[in-house]
């Protein structure tokens, strides 16, 4: 096997991915080409001189004398699951529009549901993208409430803010959407917020949006005063949903996709895992104008430098969790 093979070929379908990556050497060459396009580099000392132990598909660094596999320093580190299962798993979560449950992955790949659940969460970490630069131009801002407990919200406030939606079990989520960004498509950033108070929402907006941009919101009082820094367009949903350019329909569309995935596929999501599902849906939304192969490769570009241990994932140090991961 050429250990410095370039990733020249990307499958186009899930079936193609399963067949293609079913060959351990092909899967390795693909990932090596993606991770080290200019030749293998030791993740311990950045050395470029090493010998390849073909039978174990690992390298021995001639500089620091340590051994390493392509998984070291990535979300795959310490996982006994082979790339022949990992890569189709990445493919599925990158491309299933409504997400994919750990039960489906377990059945498709022949692993336990618990393993699949852990694999999917590691993939979600790879799908987490940093927020580079501020949004500009026209930006929609909106908030919604999603499964889980509104633990941080005062009872009276909760009753006032969330009417008739079973708000007792909801967590607040805030979203920003830049219309017609640099690639011509809209892009979202979403995060869980402890409350929807003015200070909280407005500081998020100022962190993420260039002063002077057009900002469109609904008539929530928390948005009052934005016109000091932005051109603020407000739409009162009790009167109408669109007033020319002033609407939040882009984000409404995103919320409906998100809720479909959470309610339809994931069924129950613990509050402290919610941000991972937001990362997943945000990734797919922002890459929606590409194709399955491109989305797959783009998740793989996010695997390096990230690790998620099982202990950290289940938050065993958090009093909230019983130590048993949620079933989905
Ligand atoms: Zn080394």
Image (cartoon, rainbow, N blue to C red):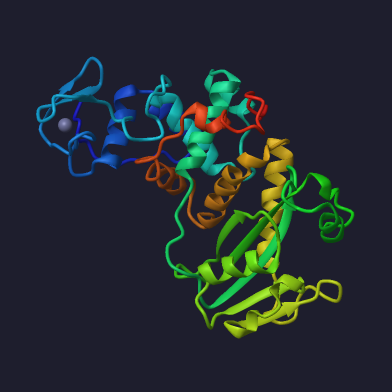
Query: Does any portion of residue 124 appear in the rendered image?
Result: yes
Please provide percent x and percent y for residue 197. 70, 64
Examine the image and state in which quarter residue 245 appears.
Answer: bottom right
Quadrant position of the C terminus in the picture: top right
Give residue 272's quadrant in the image. Answer: top right
Ligand 1 located in image quadrant: top left
Residue furthest to the right:
164
The residue sitting at 61% across, 35% down in the picture is 100
Q: Nearer the viewer, residue 254 or 88?
A: 254
| Residue beneath the point at 51% across and 32% down | 312
Across and down, in percent, residue 257 comes to 68, 51
Q: Looking at the rendering, in which quadrant would you find the N terminus?
A: top left
| In-image side of 50 versus 19 (left or right) | left
Residue 34 horizontal side relative to residue 252, left or right: left
Q: Indicate whether 151 appears above or below 136.
A: above
Along the viewing direction, whichever of 282 and 91 lies nearer the viewer: 282
């Amino acid at each position: 096997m050429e250990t410095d093979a370039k990733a020249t070929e990307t499958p186009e379908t899930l079936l193609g991915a399963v067949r293609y990556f079913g060959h351990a050497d092909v899967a390795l060459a693909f990932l090596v080409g993606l991770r080290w396009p200019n030749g293998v580099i030791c993740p311990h000392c950045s050395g470029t001189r090493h010998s390849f132990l073909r039978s174990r598909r690992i390298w021995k660094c001639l500089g620091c004398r340590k051994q390493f596999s392509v998984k070291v320093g990535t979300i795959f580190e310490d996982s006994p699951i082979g790339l022949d299962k990992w890569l189709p798993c990445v493919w599925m979560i990158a491309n299933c529009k409504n997400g994919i449950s750990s039960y489906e992955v377990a059945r498709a790949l022949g692993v336990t549901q618990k393993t699949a659940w852990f694999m999917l969460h590691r993939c979600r970490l790879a799908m987490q993208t940093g927020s580079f630069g501020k949004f500009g131009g026209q930006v929609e801002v909106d908030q919604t409430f999603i499964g889980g407990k509104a633990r941080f919200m005062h009872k009276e406030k909760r009753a006032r803010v969330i009417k008739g939606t079973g708000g007792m079990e909801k967590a607040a989520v805030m979203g920003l959407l830049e219309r017609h960004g640099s690639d011509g498509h809209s892009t979202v950033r979403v995060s869980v917020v402890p409350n929807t108070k003015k200070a909280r929402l407005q500081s998020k907006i100022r962190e993420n949006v260039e002063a002077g941009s057009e900002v469109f919101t609904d008539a929530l009082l928390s948005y009052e005063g934005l016109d000091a820094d932005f051109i603020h367009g407000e739409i009162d949903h009790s009167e109408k949903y669109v007033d020319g350019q002033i609407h939040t329909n882009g984000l409404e569309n995103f919320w409906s996709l998100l809720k479909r995935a959470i309610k339809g596929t994931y069924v129950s999501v613990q509050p402290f895992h919610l941000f991972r599902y937001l990362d997943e849906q945000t990734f797919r939304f922002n890459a929606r104008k590409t194709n399955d192969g491109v989305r797959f490769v783009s998740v793989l570009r996010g695997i390096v430098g990230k690790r998620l241990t099982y202990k950290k994932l289940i938050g065993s140090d958090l009093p909230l969790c019983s130590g048993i991961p949620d079933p989905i």
